[in-house]
Image (spheres, rainbow, N blue to C red):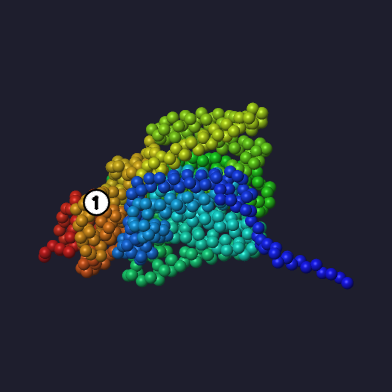
């Protein structure tokens, strides 16, 4: 007789966990995490929030161009959907509208003001720091994750952009979230969840495209490359993952492209920045591929006398050294030499690792991100602004954190020790160079950085070569000195950026450069008043950024304060558009002061084919536009578009048929009272 033992648990047995996870505690996180990790993470996120939110409302409407579009989105759902500059939906901003959706919805919830517009931007910065930390931690450990988050939070250009209303904040968040999703996809590539995470990667890159078009896709080589390199599955599975990600990206972009193209053109705003009122032309034209390849529309926005070219007036001459020049250097390059050194050394140390080695994969991901962005920004021939470099910041932070942690773990190797010393020496030397460019800003700091850095370098070099006992005993002090020397200048610039209000469309982080910084945009904007002798208009920093002014391309109406008399006139207009003015910048300023819709003839540059002369005449005849307001002197009433532009044609017709009056120091034409024949 045989007996059978039942494997079924007794009725009172506790249920068996399907996927046991480490227990969590509120202040420590998972039980298997280091005791110091969660407290430091909370300090990092709280400190980042304070840095990005402190006195945030002081910048007011920041970039008036985007602020006016946000205001329009709080007044009209159609304006919010398309990213219209005005609530009556004449023309859109020259970017896709995703960033405006976030700020516009916040304005609808809390009312339109500086805080409702800028707080979402700051919170995107906190989220980006948290996501970068989590992404780096998965493959490089908790220390590297926290270091990467701190490096991103304290990058000067990141502090600037996460306290400003440009689309770059959402762009960085989308790209960082896409990297997180890609890492998760690789970790579970053998399961169905791997495909879902890959789809999330593509969808997030699609959202990034709807934020700032092709710039969001500069991370594609790094993300695709690391999936192919590190996913522990067959070639067929890896290709399937790439196909799923590509499909999700196309869908997340395609719905909006189809919406715009299928929507009747007479029922939606003109697509600003395009030549044929199509979204595709916006992508392929001056604000898309034109930014990289140059060509028509990418001269950088010369505003009048003294205007310079886009290449030299904004980001400096093209070439491998552009990231270190007067425009970009103080924004992003403080730790760039160190990142390049640890990247090269890290790849050398891991050269014999297996294909799916996670540390090398992390170097490929973040190093690829950094290199692609750096090369594109260095050699792009169209308009480039120094604040674009914020998109490099996660790659820079991730590369330095992963590479530094790897070399520290492998410090028994002479190569690793020498690379760490070289990185510190390069950072110290370059920090001193950057600090010398702003001699009036904390003049003692460069000496402190130099002395502390030299002592730390010599001490660590002695330890790397001799490994004597006294060096080991002094190691904690040397490491503190290394951190102070490496981060001192960058942190000082970040703090100065947070303490300074910024407004206008050309802004930069840190104090003004003694050598002129970005040099402004030629001192003028669309239809604006050109600066003299190549200088920005009065009130702007010499480097075109920082300060409360920073409005180097807001000449004419964009840079002027609207008088109470003119504001009242527009508020009492009672027409679909209270007024028309050449150029979006002037229209934005008038909209924000009056709360009314103002028609931006010719869009941002004043050269968009909207409206035609016949179309404008029809709108005037129908009583849709009450006033035309003259632009500044530099571009004349015709603005920047030239003698054949719609602005020139319209203003010539208005001058011939209507009488000019002066209201609050501005020339105004009442389009409801033509000159009697």
For the C terminus, the image quarter is: bottom left
| Mark 1 surroundings: few (<14), some (14-19) or many (≥20) residues within 10 A | many
Q: Secondary structure at mark 1?
A: loop
* 389 lies left or right of 109: right
Q: How many marks?
A: 1
Q: Is residue 669 visible?
A: yes
Question: Which quarter of the picture shows residue 156?
Answer: top left
Query: Can I make out residue 360 in this image?
Result: no
Q: Nearer the viewer, residue 49 or 658?
A: 49
Q: Outermost residue, front direction? A: 12
| Residue 589 locus on image (x, y percent) | 28, 53
Residue at image position (35%, 66%) is 78
Residue identified by numbered label 1: 562
Residue 356 spot, x, y in % from top left: 66, 53
Please say if 42 is above or below 69: above
Q: Is residue 438 left or right of residue 581?
A: right
Q: Residue at x 36, y 55 (%)?
A: 66
């Amino acid at each position: 007789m045989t007996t059978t033992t039942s494997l079924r648990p007794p009725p009172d047995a506790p249920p068996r966990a399907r996927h046991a996870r480490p227990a969590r505690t509120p202040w420590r996180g998972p039980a298997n995490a280091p005791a110091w990790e969660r407290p430091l993470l909370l300090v990092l996120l709280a400190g980042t929030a304070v840095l990005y939110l402190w006195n945030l409302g002081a910048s007011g409407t920041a970039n008036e161009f985007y602020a006016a579009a946000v205001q329009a989105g709080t007044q009209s759902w159609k304006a919010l959907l398309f990213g219209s500059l005005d609530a009556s939906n004449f023309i859109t901003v020259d970017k896709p509208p995703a960033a405006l959706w976030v700020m516009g919805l916040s304005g609808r919830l809390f009312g339109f003001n500086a805080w409702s517009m800028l707080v979402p931007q700051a919170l995107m910065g906190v989220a980006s720091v948290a996501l970068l930390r989590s992404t780096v931690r998965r493959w490089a450990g908790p220390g590297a994750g926290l270091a990467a988050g701190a490096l991103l939070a304290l990058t000067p250009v990141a502090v600037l952009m996460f306290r400003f209303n440009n689309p770059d904040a959402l762009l960085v968040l989308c790209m960082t979230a896409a990297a997180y999703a890609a890492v998760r996809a690789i970790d579970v590539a053998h399961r169905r969840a791997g495909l879902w995470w890959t789809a999330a990667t593509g969808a997030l890159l699609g959202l990034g495209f709807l934020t700032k078009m092709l710039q969001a896709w500069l991370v594609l080589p790094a993300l695709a490359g690391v999936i192919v390199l590190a996913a522990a599955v067959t070639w067929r599975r890896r290709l399937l993952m790439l196909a799923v990600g590509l499909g999700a990206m196309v869908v997340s972009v395609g719905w909006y492209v189809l919406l715009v193209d299928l929507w009747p053109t007479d029922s939606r705003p003109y697509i600003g920045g395009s030549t044929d009122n199509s979204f595709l032309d916006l992508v392929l034209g001056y604000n898309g591929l034109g930014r990289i390849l140059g060509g028509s529309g990418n001269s950088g926005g010369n505003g009048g006398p003294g205007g310079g070219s886009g290449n030299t007036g904004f980001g400096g001459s093209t070439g491998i050294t552009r990231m270190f020049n007067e425009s970009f250097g103080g924004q992003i390059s403080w730790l760039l030499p160190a990142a390049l050194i640890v990247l090269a050394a890290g790849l050398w140390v891991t050269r014999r690792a297996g294909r799916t080695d996670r540390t090398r994969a992390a170097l490929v991901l973040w190093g690829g991100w950094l290199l692609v962005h750096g090369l594109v920004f260095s050699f792009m021939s169209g308009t480039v602004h120094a604040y674009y470099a914020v998109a490099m910041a996660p790659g820079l932070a991730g590369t330095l954190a992963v590479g530094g942690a790897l070399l520290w773990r492998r410090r028994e190797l002479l190569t690793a020790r020498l690379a760490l010393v070289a990185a510190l020496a390069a950072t110290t030397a370059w920090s001193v160079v950057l600090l010398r460019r702003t001699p009036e800003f904390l003049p003692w700091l460069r000496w402190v950085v130099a002395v502390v850095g030299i002592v730390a370098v010599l001490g660590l070099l002695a330890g790397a070569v001799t490994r004597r006992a006294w060096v080991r005993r002094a190691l904690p002090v040397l490491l503190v000195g290394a951190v102070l020397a490496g981060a001192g200048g960058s942190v000082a610039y970040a703090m100065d950026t947070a303490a300074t209000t910024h407004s206008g469309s050309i802004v930069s982080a840190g104090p003004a450069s003694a050598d002129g910084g970005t040099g402004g945009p030629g001192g003028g904007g669309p239809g604006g008043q050109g600066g003299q002798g190549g200088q920005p208009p009065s009130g702007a920093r010499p480097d075109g950024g920082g300060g409360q002014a920073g409005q180097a391309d807001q000449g004419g109406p964009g840079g002027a304060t609207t008088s109470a008399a003119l504001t009242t006139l527009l508020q009492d207009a009672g027409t679909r558009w209270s007024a028309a003015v050449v150029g979006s910048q002037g229209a934005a300023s008038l909209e924000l002061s009056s709360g009314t819709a103002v028609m931006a003839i010719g869009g941002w540059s004043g050269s968009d084919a909207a409206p035609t002369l016949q179309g404008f005449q029809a709108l005037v005849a129908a009583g849709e536009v009450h006033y035309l307001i003259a632009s500044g002197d530099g571009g004349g009433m015709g603005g920047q578009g030239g003698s054949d532009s719609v602005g020139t044609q319209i203003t010539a017709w208005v001058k011939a048929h209507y009488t000019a009056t002066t209201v609050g120091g501005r020339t105004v034409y009442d389009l409801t009272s033509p000159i009697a024949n």
